[in-house]
């Protein structure tokens, strides 16, 4: 059940993709997922300078002990930022990385560069129509994350379950599905539907290898499925985050009619969450990406334990469904 086109394409034992996490998916976290059998992606934008990114690339290679790891390339709506993106891609290729998660239409221009270097990429989108476009542009695989996902799930508010069915009707390349996946029961269902991998983010946020303050992890563990909320629909770039004090202030401004980035000032700066919450331990300050699967995050634990639990839950459900009742497929 774990051997799919996606596991073979990425050379991994488990087609479990830990999507890039701004500020958090550094070498230590990525290597922990890779050593547990999955694939994870470092986010170069999280590092203060190129030298630190280079250091993290080298550290990750060392920690992965020969296993492949990935880089997340998230394109910006600002074209100047995409010059940086191309440099980050080149630095990854120079360091021997050949596995990429790409996000945003400007990344389509990177596909040839990745393929010319014998690399593979999974292009992540928010709904099925964009997945089809990515396939037409030459993506090796596509990931769709539904509106349940932490981070920026896109404007169209489609659930992962719905997007999955639409996309599978149209795609030839393999599909990974994410957004709200926090239990192996869901992974078994997605594999049965025809997905060949899953994308997770929120489920791993309280893991030991995540470099955020213990107070933020404690808040995440206390949170239930209602504790994430979408903000910034007003600027057409929705962001699913922890429903904390900053999120409440942003929602309040949106209700008052604020509809441009400047109107929110410092409140929506990513660096606010990084310094005040992830570094200093105040979970109420800053917008902190968090998805609806947060209710499945129940304790601090190593990444390997969280992934082992997901695998066990998946296999148990698969076995109950296909082996006990109907005979193994
Ligand atoms: C804290 C956090 C930071 C994220 N940062 C990024 C990012 O920088 N780039 C990106 O492509 N996706 C980012 N995402 C989205 C994840 O890669 C992944 O697609 C998503 O978490 C999957 O949905 P889930 O949170 O419901 O598991 C982030 C998600 C979280 C929770």
Image (spheres, grey):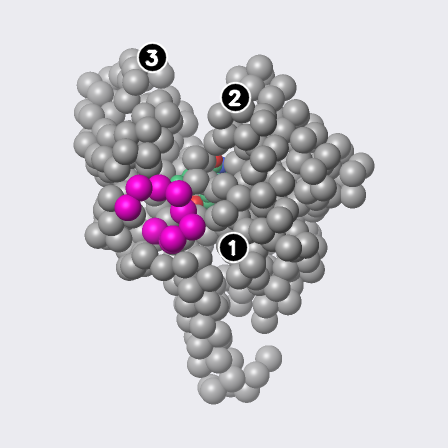
Locate residue 301 relative to residue 142 in the image: left or right: left
Residue closer to the observer: 270 or 280: 280
Mark 3 sits on what residue? Answer: 262
Residue 101 in which image quadrant = top right
Residue 80 image point, x, y percent: 57, 15
Are the two marked residues, 2 and 1, in contact with CB atoms closer than 8 angstroms? Answer: no
Q: Residues within 10 Å of mark 2 (few under 14, many from 20)?
A: few
Q: Which residue is disc 2 drawn over? A: 77
Mark 2 or mark 3, earlier in chain = 2
In primary-sequence order, the first of circles 1 and 3 is: 1
Q: Which residues are magenta?
A: 206-214
Whether pointer 2 and pointer 3 mark residues with C-beta atoms closer than 8 Å, the reply is: no
- The picture places residue 166, in percent across and down from the top left corner, at 53, 50
Label 3: which secondary element: helix
Residue at x 68% of width, y 57% of height = 11
Q: Nearer the viewer, residue 315 or 48?
A: 48
Taking the image in four quarters, ligand 1 sits in the one at top left
Mark 2 C-beta to ligand 1 under 8 Å? no
Does the stretch in magenta take in 207?
Answer: yes
Residue 50 vs 170, above or below: the answer is above
Q: Which residue is mark 1?
A: 33
Residue 102 placement, left or right of 319: right
Quadrant, the C terminus:
bottom right
């Amino acid at each position: 059940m774990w051997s799919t086109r996606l596991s073979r394409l990425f050379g991994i034992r488990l087609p479990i993709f830990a999507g890039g996490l701004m500020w958090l998916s550094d070498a230590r976290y990525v290597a922990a997922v890779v050593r547990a059998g999955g694939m994870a992606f470092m986010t170069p934008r999280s590092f203060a300078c190129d030298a630190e990114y280079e250091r993290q690339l080298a550290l990750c290679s060392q920690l992965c002990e020969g296993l492949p790891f990935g880089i997340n390339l998230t394109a910006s709506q600002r074209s100047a930022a995409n010059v940086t993106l191309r440099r980050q891609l080149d630095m990854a290729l120079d360091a021997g990385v050949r596995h990429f998660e790409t996000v945003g239409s400007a990344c389509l221009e990177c596909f040839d560069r990745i393929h010319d270097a014998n690399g593979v990429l999974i292009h992540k989108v928010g709904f099925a129509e964009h997945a089809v476009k990515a396939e037409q542009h030459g993506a090796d695989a596509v990931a769709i994350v539904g509106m349940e996902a932490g981070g920026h799930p896109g404007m169209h508010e489609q659930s992962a379950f719905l997007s999955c069915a639409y996309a599978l009707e149209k795609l030839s390349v393999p599909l990974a599905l994410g957004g709200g996946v926090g239990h192996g029961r869901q992974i078994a269902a997605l594999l049965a539907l025809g997905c060949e991998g899953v994308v997770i983010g929120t489920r791993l946020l309280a893991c030991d290898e995540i470099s955020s303050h213990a107070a933020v992890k404690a808040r995440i563990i206390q949170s239930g499925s209602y504790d994430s909320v979408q903000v910034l629909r007003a600027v057409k770039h929705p962001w699913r985050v922890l429903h904390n004090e900053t999120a409440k202030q942003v929602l309040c401004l949106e209700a008052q009619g604020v509809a441009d980035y400047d109107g929110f000032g410092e409140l929506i700066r990513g660096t606010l969450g990084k310094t005040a919450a992830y570094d200093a331990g105040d979970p109420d300050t800053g917008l902190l990406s968090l998805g609806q699967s947060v209710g499945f995050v129940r304790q601090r634990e190593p990444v390997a334990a969280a992934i082992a639990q997901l695998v066990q839950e998946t296999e148990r459900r698969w076995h109950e469904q296909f082996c006990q009742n109907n005979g193994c497929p």
